[in-house]
Image (cartoon, rainbow, N blue to C red):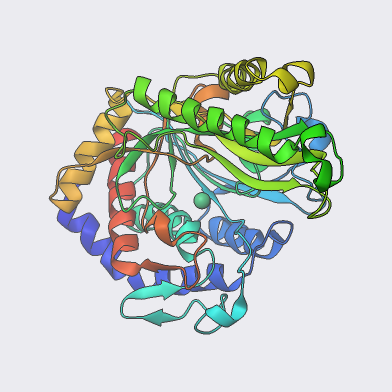
């Protein structure tokens, strides 16, 4: 399609897009409260003539899947919306999923916000509000890419699916539902905030709990007890050494910082009962990063082995081994090879629309991408407007010009990838 024509048509839809994005942001959609925004999106997709399905996430349908994790939210009224723009079936092309999540993280301390987190207020070309950047703007760009192409009378040869999902922030049961229910395509764009960089590689993350036993005694008799806190420090050092070693040994060209690919962080430490008692127990919880190409099992084994090794070197710990448990989020890493034709095509389209060379990057956070690459075997990338540094932040915002550019790139990509 002619780029000037397409670009002009997206610009002409700017006001409509902004009004719709504002409504999306104003529909507060904390986990379990996504129903309203999902209905808004379903109505919009229906008005565009898409074949719209409401797809509820029910734990019982998902429990057997290896990527399932109960995120603790009640499954009633947690729905996903899938809109299918049916291809003509003629001509060469590939199908495409545009995926976005509508759940948002809590707003935190309200007094730190300038105005309501659900205002959708516009100042200096930016729209503010929880979820504006992560990632209602991206999803809105995907919806309007289709909307504008329809206004231009374009019909793809192959299907374009818009998936508006829940539960991404708490582990991905929305996208998992769409996969289990059989929704698939030849490629996926996850419209997460990447500042319009192509991010087809992500690290994983596993949560763990470490329990260290000591032997309590009155502090006045300390040499006859064993401090669990001091034993924990030995293990913490071993964890940090493991972190350094893993980063030293792993190389990947798309990561910005070679020392921050899959960090291991101890986030909470609870131990001891009383200042004058030698502590009996420490319980620490943390997050272990999973390297691209590494399985969750291998990452777990690496941590368990490092802890075991450190424990064996200590007389007390070798007799009273610390316990490692894995709980809650267990996110795999994910990756689509850089030379995949889908990524190459998206890079070309990005350059064509923006005039600048595409930037390929890897990200250190988990998202639904891994579900597509690992479990649905579909090539996928993150690509969208906004800065991930703004995601989950106070006064979250998205620059509207970037939303417009994303809309143009996604629309152009549809015409290039899906055929006509
Ligand atoms: Zn997100």
Query: Above or below — where is 124 with respect to 250?
Result: below
Query: Above or below — where is 400 with respect to 277?
Result: below
Quadrant occupied by the N terminus: top left
Residue at figure coordinates x 72%, y 24% from the top left = 65
Quarter where residue 341 is shown = top left
Instruction: Describe residue 99's horizontal placement relative to residue 270 as left or right.
Output: left
Instruction: Describe residue 269's horizontal placement relative to residue 2 as left or right.
Output: right
127 or 154, which is in the foreground?
A: 127
Residue at figure coordinates x 71%, y 31% from the top left = 68
**Residue extending farthest left:** 355
Please state the horizontal and vertical placement of residue 89, each as a whole percent of the image: 42, 29
Please state the horizontal and vertical placement of residue 159, each as a whole percent of the image: 46, 36
31 or 259, which is in the foreground?
A: 259
Quarter where residue 225 is shown = top right
Instruction: Describe residue 276's horizontal placement relative to residue 97 as left or right.
Output: right
Quarter where residue 190 is shown = top left
Please state the horizontal and vertical placement of residue 198, each as a whole percent of the image: 31, 40
277 or 299, which is in the foreground?
A: 277
Instruction: Describe residue 273's horizontal placement relative to residue 117 as left or right.
Output: right
Quadrant occupied by the C terminus: top left
Residue 201 shows in the view: yes
Residue 208 shows in the view: no
């Amino acid at each position: 399609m002619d780029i000037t024509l397409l670009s002009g048509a997206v610009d002409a839809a700017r006001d409509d897009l902004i009004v719709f994005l504002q409504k999306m942001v104003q529909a507060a959609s904390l986990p379990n409260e996504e129903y309203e925004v999902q209905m808004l999106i379903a109505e919009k997709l229906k008005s565009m003539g898409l074949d719209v399905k409401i797809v509820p996430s029910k734990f019982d349908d998902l429990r057997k899947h290896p990527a399932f994790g109960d995120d603790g939210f009640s499954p009633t009224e947690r729905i996903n919306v899938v809109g299918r723009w049916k291809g003509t079936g003629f001509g060469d092309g590939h199908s495409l999923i545009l995926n976005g999540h509508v759940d948002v993280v809590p707003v935190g301390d309200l007094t730190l916000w300038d105005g309501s987190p659900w205002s959708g207020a516009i100042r200096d070309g930016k729209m503010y509000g929880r979820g504006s950047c992560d990632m209602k703007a991206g999803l809105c760009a995907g919806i309007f890419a289709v909307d504008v192409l329809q206004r231009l009378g374009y019909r793809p040869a192959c299907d374009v699916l818009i998936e508006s999902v829940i539960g991404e922030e708490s582990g991905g049961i929305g996208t998992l539902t769409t996969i289990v229910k059989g929704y698939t395509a030849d490629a996926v764009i996850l419209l997460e905030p990447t500042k319009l960089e192509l991010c087809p590689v992500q690290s994983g993350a596993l949560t763990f709990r470490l329990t260290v036993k000591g032997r309590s005694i009155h502090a006045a008799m300390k040499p006859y007890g064993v401090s669990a806190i001091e034993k924990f420090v030995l293990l913490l050092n071993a964890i940090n050494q493991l972190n350094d070693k893993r980063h030293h040994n792993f190389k990947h060209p798309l990561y910005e910082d070679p020392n921050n690919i899959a960090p291991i962080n101890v986030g909470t430490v609870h131990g001891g009962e009383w200042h004058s008692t030698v502590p009996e127990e420490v319980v620490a919880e943390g997050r272990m990063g999973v390297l691209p190409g590494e399985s969750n099992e291998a990452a777990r084994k690496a941590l368990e082995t490092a802890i075991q090794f450190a424990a064996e070197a200590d007389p007390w710990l070798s007799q009273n081994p610390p316990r490692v448990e894995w709980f809650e989020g267990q996110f795999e890493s994910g990756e689509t090879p850089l030379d995949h034709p889908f990524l190459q095509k998206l890079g070309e389209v990005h350059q064509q629309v923006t005039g600048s060379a595409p930037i390929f990057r890897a990200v250190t956070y988990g998202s639904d991408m891994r579900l597509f690459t690992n479990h649905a075997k579909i090539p996928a990338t993150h690509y969208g407007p906004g800065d991930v540094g703004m995601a989950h932040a106070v006064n979250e915002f998205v620059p509207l010009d970037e939303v417009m550019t994303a809309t143009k790139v996604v629309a152009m990509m549809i015409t290039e990838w899906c055929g006509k």
